[in-house]
Amino acid sequence: MKLLLINPPHTAIGSRVPDEHLPPLGLLSIGGPLIDAGFDVALLNADRENLDLADIADRVSQMQPDAVLIGHSGSTSAHPTIVVLTQMMRQNQPNLTIIYGGVFPTYHWNDVLCACPQIDVIVRGEGEATVCNLMCALRDNVDLSYIRGLAYHAPDGPKATPLAPMLQDLDAHRIGWELIDFKDYSYWGGKRAVVLQFSRGCPHLCTYCGQRGFWTRWRHRDPVKFAQEIAWLVREHGIELINLADENPTSSRRMWRAFLEALIELGVNVLIVGSTRAGDIVRDADLMPLYKRAGVIRFLMGLEGTDQTTLATVRKGSDQTTDQTAIKLLRQHDMIGLCTFAIGFEEETDADYWRLLRSLLRYDPDQIMSVFATPHRWTPFFSASSHRKVIEPDLRRWDYKHQVLDCPNVPPLRIFLWVKLIEMTLQLRPKAIWRTYFHSNLDIRHAMRWYTRMGRGVVLREVLGFKGGRSRAKGQNVASFWGSTQGLPEDAMARVKLTRTPTK
């Protein structure tokens, strides 16, 4: 069978502002197993090429695959685009099999199949094993009801099979690197780059997180094998930077240290960026020299606010002292602390934003980025927000960079202005300007300048694209927007006993 993986174009600022793109790790992760199973696999990265939907549909017609497998890492905000694209592909090729995967369809499989008859099958949860089972079943004309982790059209309506078990060995399925040309992908201001995962999942309980339940449980790759793959990418394909897609790669101090030591032993020159928790940085204060020697240049840490009441409400499991200490530790070892702060909680007032600005100035992060609280239906935050008004009905803007919920005490325009004031104040401080243009470390200067250039483009796009709460008058709350007051089950995969238990 001839299979085509499609990464659709994404409207989010992160896809359109930088003139750089990273490979679609999710699609490559299912591409490798499919190739090894004997299928003819190709990748169409329409996001990188910024193709319009008609061009994509035409290319698919020219390539004549037996099936397309489509998904995007920005799952919720990419869904409206995927709906239109799959309609166009179905119109051009009535016999084409269309398979859809990702976080959003995993949870909203019933809604998607009811509204989208052109989509044949949804892969729920991790796809590496499930897609191989699915494609073999389609090739051999086997009943899909025997395949776990699917949803599809049945005579009596959409049907879901039992959840697939989560992968126990993350090294068992290889990434299909042969599907890309490494020269096409860069990040960090022109550095050849790829995305990788050391681990999946997160052991923490933040109420708004849309990822924790999808991965079900924190698991990690073999630290030595992971380091060896990075070394191979550096030596054979000229990779200069690794962007870790993990929610929390440092959860196990022992495993993370083993990875750092293995990578240092291999002696490759590479930069590593990723996300982690401030508490893990503080825990690893004595390991900071290892972080640096292995190539870590930046970690993103979600502060989600600086008010202790807010941190407790969202079950962040952190505190102000820990956050500030983590920022200082990274700076002391010539690494960058990129801190996100969350906006859009119901109780916020202008006074809260003023306190947030003052607190962030005390925190003194190197880089800053705002995110907006977004109520995904499979998270506890959905239930807590079900009564709140939705001011942004366009799912393409549900990307954490646009305000989607009404805040009763502050109108959207003023919130937008507060956010821009906070970001610009932090980035235009004399300290920040000095780090950007005069820091003694060349890698730090390069990173700060690149982030500043990209930030200017982001601000311009946000200002031009701002919609000042035009949807407030509709009065639709979160529950009615999603069609129910009931949340969706959070776990996307069956919990099984792991043969290899991560250790701290």
Image (spheres, helix red, strand yellow):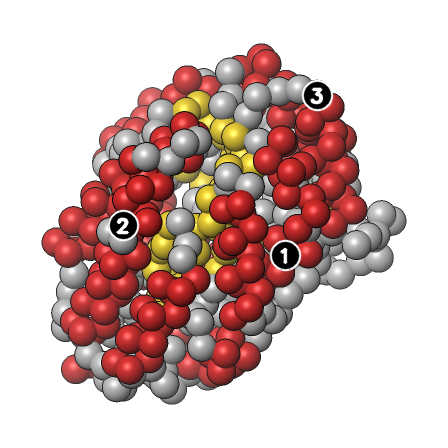
Q: Which amino acid does label 2 sit on?
A: Pro
> Disc 1 and disc 3: Cα gap in Å?
26 Å
> Disc 3 and disc 2: Cα gap in Å?
39 Å
Q: Which amino acid does label 3 sit on?
A: Leu
Residue 430 - label: 2
Q: Which of 7 and 278 is in front in this view?
A: 278
Would you place residue 412 above or below residue 9 in this image?
A: below
Mark 1 neighbour density, 10 Å: few (under 14) some (14–19) many (20 or more)? many
Q: Is mark 3 on a helix, strand or loop?
A: helix
Q: Which residue lies furthest to the top in this view?
A: 236
Q: Nearer the viewer, mark 1 or mark 3?
A: 1
Q: Residue at x 28, y 32 (%)?
A: 19
Residue 266 - label: 3
Q: Residue at x 62, y 26 (%)?
A: 230
Horizontal side of 201 relative to 351 (left or right) equals right
Q: Name the residue under label 1.
A: 282
